Image (cartoon, rainbow, N blue to C red):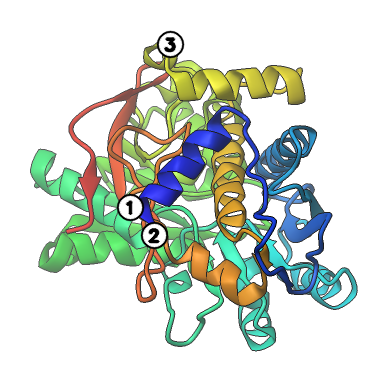
């Protein structure tokens, strides 16, 4: 299986679409046929997390590229991408439509912790593959209770634990202030930080303040956290609020060690709106290559990404990490679908998604690999620390895995 996936990845990287065997028995589930593979997703094209809409746009464009090259095993991918405005009730309604009316083979890259939570149980009862969710909530790795759901990015608790280890090593006497979104997304990070700090968490965390996705700004929260006397700031937000927090902290003269979570680290969607000068010194952890980093200027995988952006997304902001993320997720899904061959049943799709071994993508950092198994639903468990120098994220240290 390992060698098969590596051969497949190499073929797809140069645009070769595998042909189905003439003697293979064809088996189809809902949304699949001799000519089509129908997938569904919800994305926040509007609402407070609309910056993430770039992910869905990149994935639509990627499958357009795949289709122009002949599709996957001769079948065209039809990705139905619907707006949920980052509202759980709307996400549930849209997913019901995708499953019960559009009859999709699988859900792919549905975005957001609160939105996915709204239909998590529903899709598992319906036995619909709920694949590569655009959220790192730890609960997506629960094969016993939710066997049809697999996440995509590193678990938020794993990521927060890496930040905790960094703080303990480099600033053991830190006074930490935490800003977090008041839902499972934000609370997952807080738990990961506390677990990572262990018995020192009670002493080191001096302030925690939350915000609601319906809030206009987080300015008052930043003022409150500054008044706590904290010298370290863990910023757990989504792009709109991340930019506000960075800007406000700078404007009131608060200069803590500022750690921002990965999903709010996009240069184009967060740091430019906040102000590049105000963002200098930020720390995060990455698993994808930064499109602004000149060290990838001759990297073959990133060159394929740049060629893709130029042809299929002309005019898009190439400094936005979200386009890299969407490309990577769509590339992974393409490889899994191709591995299904002519058995495009929901059961076989899950089998292939759970058979990944040390897979890399055009856009993953060296040392970061995707692996799954029947009892391992976490695709990535490695990240690398990075510091923003005012222009780009500069990697430092080694790739770090879960302890």
Which disc is residue 298 wearing?
3
Using the rendered image of the protein, determine whether residue 243 is visible from the camera's viewpoint: no
* Residue carrying label 2: 155
Distance between the Cα atoms at labels 3 and 2?
30 Å
Q: Quadrant of residue 12?
A: top right
- Disc assigned to residue 99: none
Q: Quadrant of residue 91?
A: bottom right
Counting from the top left corner in percent of width and height, residue 242 is at 52, 40
Given residues 51 and 22, the one toward you in this image is: 22
In 3D space, how far apart are the residues under numbered discs 3 and 1 (Cα atoms)? 29 Å
Q: Is the residue under label 2 in contact with that under label 1 (CB below 8 Å)?
A: yes
Vertically, is 64 above or below 230? above
Compared across the picture, whether 104 is left or right of 371 comes to: right
Quadrant in which the C terminus appears: bottom left
Q: Is residue 285 left or right of residue 204?
A: right
* Mark closer to the chain start, 3 or 2: 2
Instruction: Give the left or right position of residue 95, taking residue 281 as reference.
Output: right
Query: Residue 30 placed where, x, y %?
Result: 78, 73
Q: Residue furthest front?
A: 23
Residue at position x 33%, y 49% in the image: 358
Q: Is residue 16 left or right of residue 95?
A: left
Residue 388 in the image: above or below residue 57:
above
Classify 318 as above or below 86.
Answer: above
Could you say which disc has been placed on residue 159 in the image?
Answer: 1
Image coordinates of residue 175 in percent, x first then y, are 21, 49
């Amino acid at each position: 299986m390992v060698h098969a996936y590596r051969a497949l990845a190499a073929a797809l990287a140069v645009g070769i679409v595998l042909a189905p065997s003439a003697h293979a028995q064809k088996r189809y589930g809902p949304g699949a046929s001799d000519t089509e593979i129908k997938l569904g997703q919800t994305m926040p094209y509007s609402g407070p997390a609309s910056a993430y809409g770039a992910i869905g746009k990149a994935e639509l464009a990627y499958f357009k590229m795949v289709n122009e090259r002949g599709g996957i095993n001769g079948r065209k991918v039809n990705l139905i991408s619907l707006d949920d405005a980052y509202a759980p009730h709307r996400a549930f309604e849209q997913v019901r439509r995708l499953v019960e009316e559009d009859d999709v083979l699988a859900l792919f890259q549905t975005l957001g912790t609160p939105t996915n939570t709204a239909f998590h149980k529903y899709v598992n009862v319906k036995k619909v593959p709920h694949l590569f969710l655009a959220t790192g909530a730890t609960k997506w790795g629960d094969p016993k209770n939710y066997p049809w759901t697999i996440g995509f990015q590193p678990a938020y608790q794993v990521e927060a634990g890496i930040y905790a280890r960094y703080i303990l090593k480099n600033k053991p006497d830190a006074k930490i202030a935490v800003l977090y979104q008041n839902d499972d997304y934000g609370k997952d990070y807080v738990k990961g930080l506390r677990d990572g700090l262990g018995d020192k968490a009670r002493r080191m965390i001096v302030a925690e303040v939350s915000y609601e996705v319906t809030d206009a700004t987080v300015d008052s929260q930043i003022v409150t956290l500054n008044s706590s006397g904290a010298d370290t700031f863990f910023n757990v937000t989504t792009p709109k609020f991340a930019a506000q927090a960075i800007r406000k902290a700078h404007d009131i003269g608060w200069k803590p060690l500022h750690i921002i979570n990965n999903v709010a680290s996009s240069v184009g969607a967060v740091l430019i709106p906040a102000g590049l000068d105000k963002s200098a010194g930020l720390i995060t952890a990455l698993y994808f290559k930064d499109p602004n980093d000149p060290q990838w200027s001759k990297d073959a995988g990133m060159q394929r990404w740049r060629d893709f952006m130029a042809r299929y997304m002309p005019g898009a902001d190439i400094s936005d990490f979200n386009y890299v993320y969407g490309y990577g997720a769509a590339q992974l899904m393409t490889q899994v679908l191709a591995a299904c061959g002519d058995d495009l049943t929901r059961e076989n799709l899950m089998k292939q998604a759970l058979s990944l071994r040390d897979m890399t993508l055009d856009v993953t950092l060296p040392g970061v690999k995707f692996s799954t198994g029947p009892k391992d639903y976490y695709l990535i468990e490695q990240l690398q620390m990075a510091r923003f120098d005012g222009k780009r994220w500069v990697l430092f240290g080694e790739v770090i895995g879960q302890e």
